[in-house]
Amino acid sequence: MRLILRLRPICAALLLVVISTLATATSAQPYTNESPAGRNDRMRWWREARFGMFIHWGVYSVPAGEYKGQRFDRIGEWIMLDGHIPVAEYREYAKQFNPVNYDPEFWAQLAADAGMKYIVITSKHHDGFALFPSEVTDWDIEDASPYGKDLIGPLREAARRRGLKFGLYYSQAQDWTHPGGAKARHSLAGWDPAHDGDFDVYLDRIAVPQTREILARYDLDILWWDTPVEMNEERARKFLPLLKPYPKLIVNNRLVRPAPKGDFDTPEQRIPGTGIDGDWETCMTMNTTWGYKFYDHNWKSAETLLTNLIDIASKGGNFLLNIGPKSDGTIPQESIDRLRAIGKWMKINGEAIYGTTASPTSRPRWGRITTKVGGETTTLYLHVFDWPTDGLLPVPIANEVVECHLLAEPDRKFEVHRSQSQGLAVKLNGTAPHEIASVVVLRVQGEPHALIQATPQGEDGSIVLRPVDADIHSRMNTTPRVESQDDDAALSYWTDPTAWVKFKLQLNRPGTFEVLVETSSAVDGSRMGVEIGNGRLDVAVPNTGGNDKYAETTAGRVTLAQPGVYEVDVRPHEEGWQAVNLRSIKLVPVD
């Protein structure tokens, strides 16, 4: 198979790209037989919410990352495994887990004030400790701690009073306390004889009945599985009947892998560079741990967290942002401060997040775009991170303009100019109203008709085409994707021969260029063809020894004699194609 790269001038005709926001995955919820309309109705509130609070809380907040004087680099809630703490010894920590300062009303209000629309809290994490009174074990808040009463119910009620949806995380496949559940590292039996036992017996006696308990008791909107170690489809079928009485329930994709899929994907601690087809939710910590660690002071700034929220919404995803409370029930002040900072912005600009869909264009260099399509018009929310010094905000959209104003100051109007080749250009006035992200409201006629953004020529005359600026297409469900929002992120998982990628570049200084293709591959046999004008350049994709090891291959030279906008079309062709990651295509001027 060959990868064909076509580079041709764009004439008078505009390339119109319509981005669909409808999920194409089949059987997204495996335990119900619902119509597409029924699924859309069930998922509507979740898609509109965009922002939620994750809470990791449990006995692990007592050692808080330190065991016998040793501090662990990994996440706080994994200390039992990382320290190989014996079960009997770990159970003693529960006697110190006494959250007398727990204030569920404050927690729920903090989420609401931050602009969050739902809460998901750990009902039982991998240490097996239940934050609810469980009838199937004494390793729970009621029987094993001095607090002695339910922690989940009061938070659910506080959330409901504020109009927030409520969900529970449940670790169905890892349990380092109950016999048979310590399968944390594939087939290892654990580090303590107390772990000995049969995994299926554990599922039958603990995980399945506890799942039944939380579903019946708490009227959940979301059920969030995690780490499906040792899970297979046969074991998953133990849980699926429990879900059938709750047809409105939304579940994630971590019950079992590779199937069934669940309702949404869950990229963890990362933001996919170009989003994910279908529904998805990035979960992320504020520092480096989920569960509380007293010495983890590596806090993300409020600016980073806010721009992450905007970036995720601009790609059609949700943001589940974590807090890790202390063992006494208080929330670290650093978390409170950051949530309040986000909430201050959301109070004014939340309209640009809630109910929006992904940007119809690849990410602009000045910020991000979220979208609302309704009736005969489309509203584009332009989240400006870098207020332009020349006042011009290019928007590669080929629509007629209805109006344009600042969201925070509706009376502050902006002129918009229209170009046949470049789309729209908003002429800003004044200064940015917000130091992190200022939102410009641009309303246009009809559904958005996006133009591929042209990559400009650098000062040295070179042009670097990167996947974050690509328009990616596929006829299958295995679309290659950009896993990171970094500029040097690669187009990964390109195994689909029907997938293709489009770029556009702006050439101001014509000339002859060396074409360099940067790839990685762990196999031999793939070839790329670079077709530019009437020329064709062929190059074998090298086996770099791993998908994370990249090398540049010279495809040859091309001469582009005229300035202007050029389209780049990248397509696999013919047989023999293997998995290839593409990080860049460079055109370097030849002296």
Image (tube, rainbow, N blue to C red):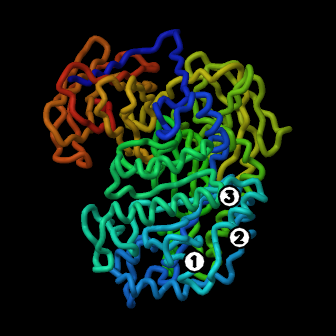
**What residue is disc 2 on?**
104
Whether residue 464 is visible to the viewer of this picture, yes or no, is: no
Q: Quadrant of the C terminus?
A: top left
Quick one: SS at disc 3? helix
Q: Could you give the CA–CA distance between mark 2 and mark 1, rounded to whole angstroms?
A: 16 Å
Extreme residue toward the left, this view? 524
Q: Is residue 571 left or right of residue 374?
A: left
**What residue is disc 3 on?**
342
Q: Determine the residue positioned at 73% across, 23% down.
A: 377
Whether residue 548 is visible to the viewer of this picture, yes or no, is: yes
Amino acid type, label 2: Pro
Which label lies toward us, 2 or 3? Answer: 2
Q: Determine the residue positioned at 56% across, 24% down.
A: 450
Mark found first going from the N terminus, 2 or 3 = 2
In x, y percent, where is residue 24? 48, 29
Mark found first going from the N terminus, 3 or 1 = 1
Please say if 11 is above or below 133: above
**What residue is disc 1 on?**
141
In x, y percent, where is residue 264? 51, 43
Q: Nearer the viewer, residue 311 or 53?
A: 53
Q: Could you give the CA–CA distance between mark 3 and mark 1, rounded to whole angstroms?
A: 32 Å
Q: Determine the residue positioned at 31% across, 29% down.
A: 496
Extreme residue toward the top, this view? 12
Q: How many numbered badges does the structure rendering display? A: 3
Quick one: SS at disc 1? helix
Amino acid type, label 3: Ile
Please say if 327 is above or below 539: below
Which label lies toward us, 3 or 1? Answer: 1
Which label lies toward us, 2 or 1? Answer: 1
Q: Determine the residue positioned at 67% across, 69% down.
A: 336
Q: Examine the image and state in which quarter residue 560 appears.
A: top left
Q: Could you give the CA–CA distance between mark 2 and mark 3, rounded to whole angstroms?
A: 20 Å
